Amino acid sequence: MGFIWSLIVGGIIGAVAGYIVGKDVPGGIIGNIIAGFLGAWIGESLFPNLGPEIGGFVIIPALIGAIILVFVFSLIIGRKK
């Protein structure tokens, strides 16, 4: 059950980051989950233990990391088009 909870929280973090940046994460739900997990890894590397933890994610650093990831990814994709 913990793995499913992590997938749900990761997907929500990825979706919120895409909404804040104003860009959709490619890949739909799977893309949001991947952005949430990678964003959590980036954010927790930069800001460890900053805020509450839900589903194995420290929420504030995970969200900041996902926003950074989605922003950089949108810049890279935007240049290729």
Image (cartoon, rainbow, N blue to C red):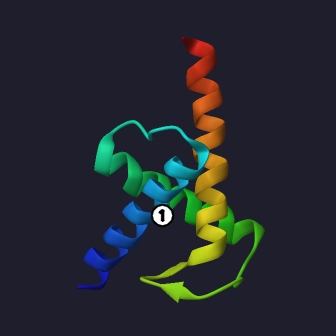
For the residue pair 3 and 69, the one nearer the viewer reads as: 69
In this view, the residue farthest toward the top is 81
- Across and down, in percent, residue 63 comes to 59, 65
28 above or below 65? above
Q: Quadrant of residue 17?
A: bottom right
Mark 1 packing: few (<14 Cα in 10 Å), some, or many (20+)? many
- Residue drawn at (59%, 68%), measured in percent from left and top? 62
Q: Residue at x 40, y 64 (%)?
A: 12
Toward the left, the furthest residue is: 1
Q: Residue furthest right?
A: 46
Q: Residue at x 50, y 50 (%)?
A: 19
Residue 78 vertical position relative to residue 40 in the rendered view, above or below: above
Query: Which three-letter amino acid code belongs to the residue tagged 1?
Result: Ile
Q: Quadrant of residue 55?
A: bottom left
- Callout 1: helix, strand or loop? helix
- x and y, in percent, of residue 11 in the image: 38, 61
Identify which residue is drawn at 51% across, 48% down: 18
Q: Would you identify the image quadrant in which residue 75 lies? A: top right
